[in-house]
Image (cartoon, rainbow, N blue to C red):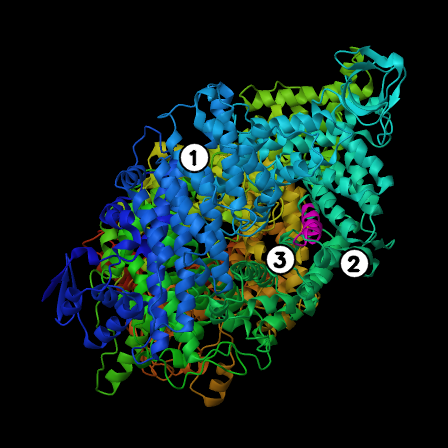
Amino acid sequence: MATVDASLWWDPFSLLLTDLENAPLSDELPPNLVKKLKANHAWFVDTVSLFKPPSEKSKAALDSQLVKIGSHQLDVKPELKDKALTISSYLCLDEVQSYILVERSLKENNVALDSEAHEYVHAVLIHYYIERQCLLKCTRSIVMLALSLGIDSEEGNSIKEEALKLISDGLEKKLIYVLQDLLSSNPPEEMDVDLFSLWAEETLIEDNLVLDILFLAYCESLCTCKGETWKALCLLYKGILSGSSNFEKLAISTEALHSSYQAKVQLLLILIETLDLESLLRMVHDEIPFRNGESAITLADIQEIEAIISTLNAFETKEAGPLILAWAVFLCLISSLPGKEENDILMEIDHVGYVRQAFEASSLTYFVEILESDVLKESDGPVAGYLSVLRTIISAFIAAYEINLQMEDGTLMLILDILCKIYQGEESLCIQFWDRGSFIDGPIRCLLCNLESEFPFRTVELVRLLSSLCEGTWPAECVYNFLDKSVGVSSLFEIANNSFRDVLSQTVETNFPLHVPGLEGLVIPSKTCGRILRLVGENTALVRWEYTQSGVLVLLMRLAQELYFKRNEEVLLILNLLSRMVTFSMAVCFALMDIGSSLHFQSTGMSGQNNMWVVEMISTLVRRLSPTPSGAALMSVAINTLAKMLKCSPFHVAEVALKANMFDFEIGNNGSSSESWLLSGKLAKMLIIDCEHNDSDCTLTISVLDFTLQFMESGVKNDGVLALIVFSLQYVLVNHVYWKYKLKHTRWRVTLKVLEVLKRCITSTCSGNLDEVILDRIFCDSSIHNTLFQIVCTTPQTLERLCSSRLIELTEVEGLQLAICSVLDVLFIMLSKFTKDTSSSLPIFHQAVFSSATKPIPLVAALVSFISYSRNPQIQVGAARVLSVFLMSADIIQPYLFGSSFGLDDTQIGDLRHGISDIILEQSVLNEDLFVAVVNLLTSAARYQPAFLVAVLSTKVNKDVQLSNSADVKLPTNEVLSRSSEFEKASVVDAVLHHVRRSNDLINSNPRILLNVLNFLRALWQDAARYLDILECVKHSENFWRNLSSSITVILSAKACLPENLTEAEADDFGYRYQCESSILEIMAHDVFLQKKLLHAESLVKQATESQGKIQNTGRTEKSEGESLEDILSAWCGSSVWGNLTKSLSHSEYDTSLYLRAKVAASSVTALVMVKLAQGDAGSLSVPLFEKSRILSNKLRSHPAFSEVLAKYSLRSYSAEKEQNYLILSDLYYHLQGEVEGREIGAGSFKALSRFLIESNIFQTYQLKYDGDLFITGKDAYMFDLERIRADLGLDFWDYSTWKDSKAIAETMLHHMKNVNSMVFLTSSKLSALRALRSVLTVYLDDSLEAKSTAQEMSDQLVFPCIDHICQNFLDTVELLAPELGASEEIFHFLAAQAELLLYLMISAHKSLPPSVCILVLKTSAAGLKVLSDFQPLVTGSSVSVVSSTVKLLLMLLLSAVKFSLVGGRDIVSVEDMAKISNMSLRLLPILCNHIASAEDCRLSLTNMDLILRNFLTPNTWFPLIQNHLQLQHVILKLQDRKSLESVPIIMKFFLTLARVRQGAEMLINHGFLSSLRFLFTEYLDDRSASVTMANSLSNSSDIMEKPKRIWGLGSAVITAMVQSLGDSSACSDVVENVIPYFFSEKAYIISYYLSAPEFPSDDHDKKRLRAQQRQTSLTELKETEHTLMLMCVLAKHWNTWVKAMKELDSQLREKSIHLLAFISRGTQRLGETASSSAPLICPPMLKDELNSCKKPSFVNSSCGWFALSPLGCVSKPKVSAASITSMALTTKTQATANGYHISQSHFSDIIALQIYKNTFLLLKFLCLQAECASRRAEEVGFVDLDHFPELPMPEILHGLQDQAIAIITEVCEANRVKEIQIEVQSICCLLLQIMEMAMYLELCVHQMCGIRPVLGRVEDFSKEVKLLIKATETHAFMKPSLKSLKQIMVVVYPGLVQAEDFL
């Protein structure tokens, strides 16, 4: 290993230079950069001299394999060693340094070792010179950074310390040495021409850089240039001029000539600067004598310098002239110092000869040449310093030689020309000029004052100089004030003998009014004195009159008069001055516009619209201009001035300017027709003339486009403006490409400006047909599209070639790149518009976008290539954004594509992949916007173009996957994409996962970055079926789920802040964190759902394989590194995470007080605007806001409250009506302002007016449409677009107008609006997270997709606190809402999400909820319903549906709470809790009554009311509320509404509850319920004629429709309840009289249908065929039968009416009843029959609850009676026919097997059996009533009329019922002998005993009527059964009362049995 000097090593200076250029100007440098500066200090001092010459030691070191250079080592490669030695000979560079250079250059420039020698040598040389120049630039940057911070400031700074250390370490001497070395250097002899050119150019560039550093050191006094140094530099300059240096040899190319000339200028200015003329001027000013030691240049130095200067000849070399002139000025100033007589040396030097030589050689013109050349314009050095030197020499020259206005040889004009060029564009120099403390500018200020003294006689020179001196805001205002405060007017005056007032002082007086020539209207009054400035003729003098007049007004008058004189030069200069002043200062702009109202103006008697006189004058000027070069120049400046004024006062300026029709557009009468806009030939011609003939960089075109743009931004809707827009787009945009530009880069200025107009057109909100026409032209004009594509359809390779081409200027390339960025923005907006508003046909623009024929390359190819163009990140951002919406649009318009494809090959896809990967890994910190744009591109592809995404992510693509498909944009099929064998983990995925691993840091430092990454991952999971392999790759990464879940923990631990306490950036971060939370939870929800689906599918596969005797494990056994998602979610269920999430996310950030403050502040500003408009002051308001304010003001004046105030003010004699209006508006404004400050407005007229303004929401129409991040939601919810409000108010201009004092009020409004926006954004972000929480809970806790539930359940201990958190947060949110103040739509969404999550948590409760929880939910629901009920009439737009859906959720929540309150019965609820529930129920009733009126809420409201009335309240408490609040008539009418058929059952149930109260029944009768019920039955039940009798309807009773069954039953139940509650009243009699004929005559077929008994199955095959056609029944039908029987029983009690109405129909009714009883009775007999073992009744489950009930076990557990029969007919097998059920065998116990299916008893079968016995009870009751009435009638008449005695069942039927009852009760009691029977089963037993008792009553009646006795066998059997019954019931006390009653009837029916068995 060889060792060499450590100084040979250097780190790349190009990287260090980048760090320095990006370093902050104010803050301390980053520590790593400070470290680099210290490490490279030696290089900064010695600069390029540390690149050493060749040495033998270095050459020998390369012979070793390893070379040590300080702390660095080189691995020497033989192939590189030879290259290094070659380079060493070319560059005379140390061999080791050459090796380092070769290694780096070959690596960075990708030059192959086997490439041609010239190619690699050229690459290495370029790399070498770049390093040298970057080193010099680093030194220059250090000095410039230190100077920018203030080198003399006391504050310590590392960059200043480094700069000072460089100077102290001898940087000056080293630089001079380097400069001398460069000027004497020679190239290697063997260097060819191309390399020599390169060497020459780079050497001269190094000269320039060294001179820059030297100049900075001298100019800013970092070091002092001593006499010796000055002489050395002067000799170098002399050598350059004489040709003794290598300058002449180096200047062999255009670039070299430019650098050579620049070096000469730099060295000349350094020499002038180091003469320190500034100090000399100060000494002259302070009269300080010249002494040795006080100046860097001594007398001895002066003598020696004199000797050198004397050898220079300005006539031979013009570059020597300026130095000679500077030396003359130096000598002149020294000679004018006090004590000059003491210095003989100074007296001997003839400075006059030097100045004469300089003037004769026209040395001043060399300064003009310097200023006009590009040497300073294009320099990246200290240009302002160089110009300052020129300013100093000119100022010193003026002072030294007393230059004045009397000079007639052109010197004055030359000096003025130089001064104008120096100050033009240099704000710092202009500021120094107007600073009175700057003595350097003193001589120039004196010259300016001399010019002003002759104004307006001498106007041109003054105006030119002032134009150059107004660069910047303060200088522009100084210029304006200088002119405006002019103290006199100069004019020519004929001197008469009596004109002199004082001959000595040359003062004259005019004896008559004197008209100033060229200024009509400006008259100097008589007796005005004036001072003679100079004589012009024998009797003519130029006099300065003591007549004060504004110089600005004089100029404007001059301008107005020049319209007629056609003196374009002076007009152009004046206009240019005005334009520059208004450009730099808004204050000047306002002052100019208001000058028409000044007293000076009014005294002139000028005509015109006073307040807009200047605008009117300039507009007239523009219209009269002719199409000439001078006319184009004038128009350019005038239009620019008008554009600035238009910005300051849009309404007034637009009104005047448009009225003038400056551009001669021919606009037809129908302004909205596109054919009415004809392009202006004059304007087009003037644009061409200006472009081709004027040296102004197309300023006219730029001005016209700016003017158009300003019209658009001001919101002016006018035919003239729209014509201007059409002209800009269809003429300028399309044709400017073909114009002939003097400077090529000017074309790009025009392009950028016209693209800005285009962008404004497509971003402005369409508000009329005219805008639609413009947009239609933009989207349908192919010439516009072609122009855009010509710019953007290029490649990075093309841009690189342009950058490296010497024929193309850098400004051209930069212009092209900016144009590409602008076009990309335009394309993004245009594609986004289509994406958001898809039309039925494909616009021409989109056809072009998706066409592969765009030239030179397809658009998609250009976009893909741009993403890798790292030279310009803005292009990368734009390309990624456009490609994102391109993919979205491709998905939308796919049906319209014919033969179109992306057309990307594998190479392009690969480049895109690598580019995306690099950006995601590197740019999240360096360029956040680029990172976001690229991740959004991936998200867009994931959502809309899966094939494209997989191709980008995959590093290995299946050959079958074709990325180009002629028929489809989505290229590969999903099947191809899902092949895991073809997918490999791609670098893009790794890059994305890198940020997931940083999630804990990003969530705090930059949540926006993390959010975009998570949005991409969420998009993958949302379409998981397409990305299974990618997702597996993601999930199996290290700690993926742990990283995501820990982010949620971090968010939960963050401390929340109120929106008003957050800055906008902080609020954004909080919102992004909530959205991150949302994305994470959604990803979890999607993955849980995906895994459950996969497990479900695998279980099916497993079942199939098991049936074949082979089990295959199809599951994914691979586990991700770290915890799985299931583990994490399970852990959450056992911790407080779910509760914390619920508590955090359900808390709303919404604060009504913030919203109210913003609205009040907005109304205050609105009132302020009205006050200003009442004064005629439109300020800077945009035209739309002006119109809105005017309309609102008129509405306010028509408000009744305004009239009241106006009447009061009139009574108090307050001025005229107009002034009264102003006073009222002013008082209203102060009232509102007081409310903003916290003082409430008292009730009255002003309160009403303030409410009107607050509700007007004039600024809320400015709703922000955010499109910054494609897939970040929330900001679209912003309620206020602050930027647009600020722009429309013109708030930035209020400081310059009469609105200045009110600006704080508008700023306060914007502050409150900002708080509201932050609040709404946070609310919206939380809303997304809350919805995601609901999703993940729903999916995770739902086990419907799993064969076996493996999901973790949340315990009640977790659920109940979650419910409590949500309820409390919901109540807090609701309490803040106030209908009169309005609310954001987002808060309604948030309430809905809270209610939805709360509803789910309640549903997920395992069994029941504690009463306290139910009470809290009831309270929450009630509060929400009350507030939203108040909001419903007030909301509009999309908020209507949101509020309605929220109300619906709350009603569902209320229903759930009510139902939970009923679980377990009222016995478990304490009295206190029941009282709370009852009180809340009472408060709810009025609210629910109101919601019944809503069609959407009617059903839920009625259901809630029904449950509340039946369970929590007594009729005495609820009926008065119902009576007062319920719109019963409205509800009854719903029965007749065909659209409300689904609501009929619910309405009827509610009526049933109402009918059970007597007053309720009366209400129903009074409101026409019976007629509505008739209508309902007629409408839906009358499939047959109403005259059908019972007899002929029996055969067709099965034709009744399915739909009306519940209608019939509920209607019957309501009638039943009404009859029962009305009792014996007359109303009851009326009802009965009406009802009986209707039901049993008109609707007899329905009665018959429900009383029809099914036929028992038969073994006969023919009967089986008939049986197969038998209708099924259902539980619903059985209940309908129950309601029918109940009605019959109730009506039958009214015997007299019944008999009278029924006549012969009651006999048929009894027969039907007996038949049905017989069917029920025979069921037990079927149990023992084997020949016919079929289900007697087919009643399968129909409803969801019934199907669920089938899964529950039997609760009666009886194998007797219908409890054994019903399971046969309750088989819930899909599509089971009656025939198949008939063939099933019935076992005698609880189970049967039919057709291979196992049938068992269930909860549902028990319910069917119970319903059968309920119907049995009612049938027996009806027959008992019939028998009882008949018996009573027999007692009345004294005999039994057997002919009219009602039919009764046969004893066998009754015996069957008795046997069933005995068997069931006995079995149940025996089974539960040692335990208590359930309440439900107890009630069944009691029901069966009642059935048995009534059967025996009827049996007794049969025995007595027929005179028969009990059969002995029956008595014995009955005896045995009863004995077993009595024994079984001994231990069950609940049956004793029923048994006692039963025994009483048994005594009568079987007296012998009872006595024998001793039952009593």
Q: Is residue 703 shown in magenta?
A: yes
Amino acid at the residue labelled 1:
Asp
Residue at which label 1 appears: 1372
**Residue 1562 appearing in the image:** no
Determine contact: label 2, label 1, CB under 8 Å.
no
Q: Which mark sits nearer the N-terminus, 3 or 1?
A: 3
> In what quadrant of the picture does the N terminus appear?
bottom left
Q: With 343 as the anchor, is 631 left or right in this view?
A: right
Q: Nearer the viewer, mark 3 or mark 1?
A: 3
Mark 3 vs mark 1, CA separation in Å:
62 Å
Residue at which label 3 appears: 746
Camera-nearest residue between 1661 and 1672: 1672
Question: Label 2: few (<14), some or many (≥20) within 10 Å?
Answer: some
Q: With 1945 as the anchor, is 412 left or right in this view?
A: right
**Relative image position of residue 1869 (x, y in whole percent):** 25, 57
Residue 114 picture quarter = bottom left
Amino acid at the residue labelled 3:
Thr
Give the SS element for disc 2.
Answer: helix
Mark 3 vs mark 2, CA separation in Å:
18 Å
Please name the residue shown 60% across and 63% down the image.
834
**Residue 685 badge:** 2
Amino acid at the residue labelled 2:
Lys
Q: Nearer the viewer, mark 2 or mark 1?
A: 2
Q: Is residue 463 shown in magenta?
A: no
Camera-nearest residue between 1861 and 1751: 1751
Question: Label 1: few (<14), some or many (≥20) within 10 Å?
Answer: some
- Boundaries of the magenta span: 696-710
